[in-house]
Amino acid sequence: MDKLITIERHINDTQKQYPHATGTFSNMLQDIALAAKLISLETNRAGLVDILGMTSTHNTSGERQQKLDMFADNVIFQMNDHTGRVAAMVSEEHEDLIEIPVEYDTGNYVLLYDPLDGSSNIDVNVSIGTIFAIHRKFTKGEKGTIEDVLQEGKRLVASGYVIYGSSTMMVYTTGQGVHGFTLDQGVGEFVLSHPDIRIPDDPAYYSANHGSEIEWTEGVRHFTRWLQGRGDDAGPKLKQRYIGSLVADVHRNLLKGGVFYYPGTLQDPGKPYGKIRLLYEAQAMAYIISQAGGYSSDGVGDILNIRPHTLHQRSPVFMGNRDLVKKAEDFIRAHDAEWIAAYKDYRNRELIL
Ligand code: P6P
């Protein structure tokens, strides 16, 4: 029998490479893995209840989904609020910075998370996911502050996601490569199934919502035709796969090679910044992609270099194989000067404290 490496063992083995490590950071990753197990259990049940609740689909699935988002948010909060490892949190479900309750000690890290991304897909049994990112607190004082969470992605100490699909997988990086663990429901352990994930050099797919194509800028349309192998400068002729769940779409391109993009638009209502949230979606996935040998851009430059200005700030996203994403930047640079100006105006806003 192959050596069974649980996520706890993998985290501890990685920690041993850092003699001065206190274990705080490793314990935090294990807290997140435990939260993922609890969310996985509930997510599967939600699917079951949907089936049982077919006669009252609306109440069950609608109520359940809302409960499920809040359930996942609460599980992650409860797993981290009392440990003395975290100084503040940011969640997609909370408008403001989440402080640590006064009765608990604070720690040296801040946790940013999307507890259940794509939850609108649960009632059609499509994979959804949890996304997390961890920064080191750098401000003085006990409490985590807005500056501690509004750091560039290049300063992340860890990020990862959990995908609740045909199986539950947790994929994370601490800057030492990307590693995937599959939940063995029998023993309730995440077991190493995808060591040292590297994005394949030969891409297979592109993932974008063609339903929004009419809103795309000229450069993004040229990029898409290039991906499809059309036009003079014919590109790789990739297959299109899109499931409308960020974690599932990016996970597929990470394992098979390709590019996911959700661009900004100028059509009315103009959203030059796109839809994906920077702090707890784009940055977290971009760190994973970069550690797996890929690249992530907002269409102008590296997502990991963006200086955030607000908690729920959005960013256009092109992520996957480096050469594909760089090609997107080339097409945008050549055709989308107006969009670039509008987006930079949004991206370069000053941090408002
Ligand atoms: P659209 C899910 O709601 C989400 O935030 C991401 O998970 C996903 O990539 C995107 O929205 C899908 O958006 O506009 O294509 O339905």
Image (cartoon, grey):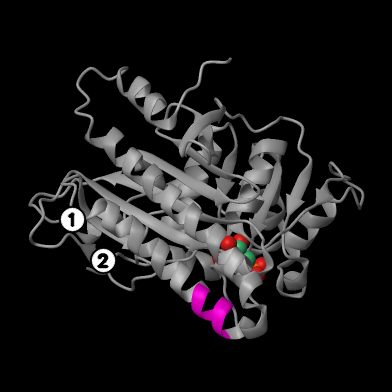
Between 110 and 28, the one lying in front of the other is 28
Which residue is tagged 2?
Answer: 97
- Residue 129 seen anywhere in this rendered image of the structure: yes
Which image quarter holds the C terminus?
bottom left
Amino acid marked by disc 1? Gly
Which residue is tagged 1?
Answer: 144
Quadrant in the picture for residue 47: bottom right
Between 216 and 201, the one lying in front of the other is 201
Q: Is residue 32 above or below residue 350?
A: above
Numbered-mark total? 2
Q: Is residue 286 above or below residue 119?
A: above
Q: Is residue 163 magenta?
A: no
Residue at the (54%, 61%) spot, across then down: 45
The percent coordinates of residue 262 (x first, y second) are: 63, 61
Q: Secondary structure at mark 2?
A: loop
Q: Is mark 2 within 8 Å of ligand 1?
A: no
Q: Secondary structure at mark 1?
A: loop
**In the rendered structure, are the residues bearing label 1 and label 2 in contact, judged by CB atoms less than 8 Å apart?**
yes
Q: Is residue 196 above or below residue 319?
A: above
Which of the two labelled residues, at mark 1 and mark 2, occupies the earlier sequence position? Answer: 2
Magenta extent = 59-64
Which image quarter holds the N terminus?
top right
Dominant SS of magenta comes to: helix
The percent coordinates of residue 272 (x first, y second) are: 57, 70
